[in-house]
Image (tube, grey):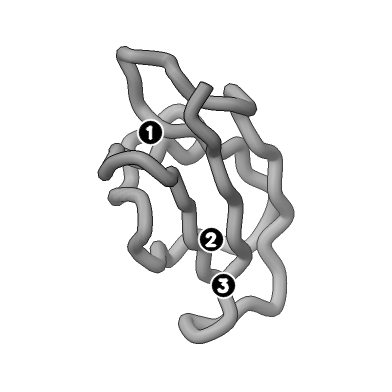
Amino acid sequence: EYLLVRFECEDRAVVIDGKSQGRTDQVLEVERGTHKISIEGPPFDFDPPQHTVVLKKTTPLSPTEVTFEKK
């Protein structure tokens, strides 16, 4: 499955289920299923603190997208 994490201000590490697994604004390959997604801090200057997503039937050209916004 495929995931795209966006953060409007800068490049950050993406944290999937508690482990750093790639960078923002890159399509990441992730196992199918439910995952908790966040980005690394400090600073913890983003909202929401975490997304929970279900990845199913995604493609590299049509990934699930989540966005974090700067506080």
Q: Give the answer, above or below, for where 9 lies relative to 48.
A: below
Q: Give the answer, above or below, for where 6 lies relative to 38.
A: below
Q: Amino acid at mark 3?
A: Pro
> Is residue 56 or residue 68 the one in the foreground?
68
Secondary structure under the numbered disc 1 in the rendered image: strand
Residue 36 horizontal/vertical position (percent) = 61, 36
3 or 1: tag closer to the N-terminus: 1
Residue 32 horizontal/vertical position (percent) = 62, 63
Q: CA distance from mark 3 to mark 2?
A: 12 Å
Q: CA distance from mark 2 to mark 1?
A: 13 Å
The image quadrant that residue 35 belongs to is top right
Secondary structure under the numbered disc 2 in the rendered image: loop
Q: Are marks 3 and 1 in contact (CB under 8 Å)?
A: no
Residue under label 1, please give it: 19
Q: CA distance from mark 3 to mark 1?
A: 20 Å
At 48% across and 29% down in the image, what residue appears? 70
Residue 53 horizontal/vertical position (percent) = 70, 49
Residue under label 2, please give it: 31
2 or 1: tag closer to the N-terminus: 1
The image quadrant that residue 52 belongs to is top right
Residue under label 3, please give it: 63
Secondary structure under the numbered disc 3 in the rendered image: loop
Residue 44 horizontal/vertical position (percent) = 42, 15
Say left or right for 22 vs 4.
left
Quadrant of the image for the N terminus? bottom right
